[in-house]
Amino acid sequence: MATPPEPQDQAPGEGEGLLIVKVEDSSWEQDSGQQEDSRDSEACRQRFRQFCYGDAGGPHEAFSQLWELCCRWLRPELRTKEQILELLVLEQFLSVLPVGIQDWVCEQHPGSGEEAVALVENLQKQPVKAWAQVRGLPSASGAPGWHLD
């Protein structure tokens, strides 16, 4: 009967039942995936908001396409009702801000409504003339309903 070769006859790691596994840090993949999801979500939001009835072949198709775009944007299978409401209210909050402020807040990429509110509140603490000059905004007196105290 043949016997297995003695360990000194084998190269290190051969025949000893060892499995070599390469461990990699996948956190960059998750970050990359989240960034892609965010970009995809934003693209779907824009397509949803810019949808034109004339692009569809009738009311049923228009409604179906809007439903699909909305689901791709808001992803109800992954998000809670609160998260979906946060997205909707954040979008509406940004849309009611004066254009220059809206642009600046959007450039900061707030992750939540609370963060967007904090950005605007911090902005309100800045001197009016300095901010108006930097961002090309009208003075507080020229922007009805908007006061940078």
Image: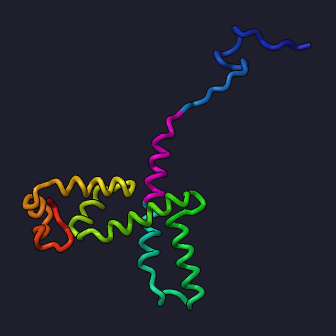
Q: Is 14 situated left or right of 90 in this image?
A: right
Q: Does the magenta run of residues contain 40?
A: no
Rendering coords of residue 136 (x, y %)? 12, 67
Foreground residue among 28 and 5 = 28
Screen quadrant of the N terminus: top right
Q: Residue at x 65, y 16 (%)?
A: 11
Foreground residue among 89 and 72 = 89
Location of residue 22 (image quadrant): top right
- Extreme right residue here? 1
Rendering coords of residue 41 (x, y %)? 46, 63
- Colouring convention used in this rendered image of the protein: rainbow
Screen quadrant of the C terminus: bottom left
Q: Residue at x 72, y 10 (%)?
A: 7
| Secondary structure mostly taken by the magenta-highlighted segment of the chain | helix
Q: Which residues are magenta?
A: 24-38
Rendering coords of residue 91 (x, y %)? 38, 66
Q: Is 142 situated left or right of 16 in this image?
A: left
Q: Residue at x 55, y 68 (%)?
A: 71
Q: Residue at x 8, y 63 (%)?
A: 133
Rendering coords of residue 96 (x, y %)? 30, 71
Q: Does the magenta run of residues contain 37?
A: yes
Identify whether 26 is placed above or below 66: above
Q: Is 109 situated left or right of 147 in this image?
A: right
Identify whether 12 is placed above or below 56: above
Q: Is 32 situated left or right of 118 in this image?
A: right
Identify whether 58 is placed above or below 37: below
Counting labels gives 0
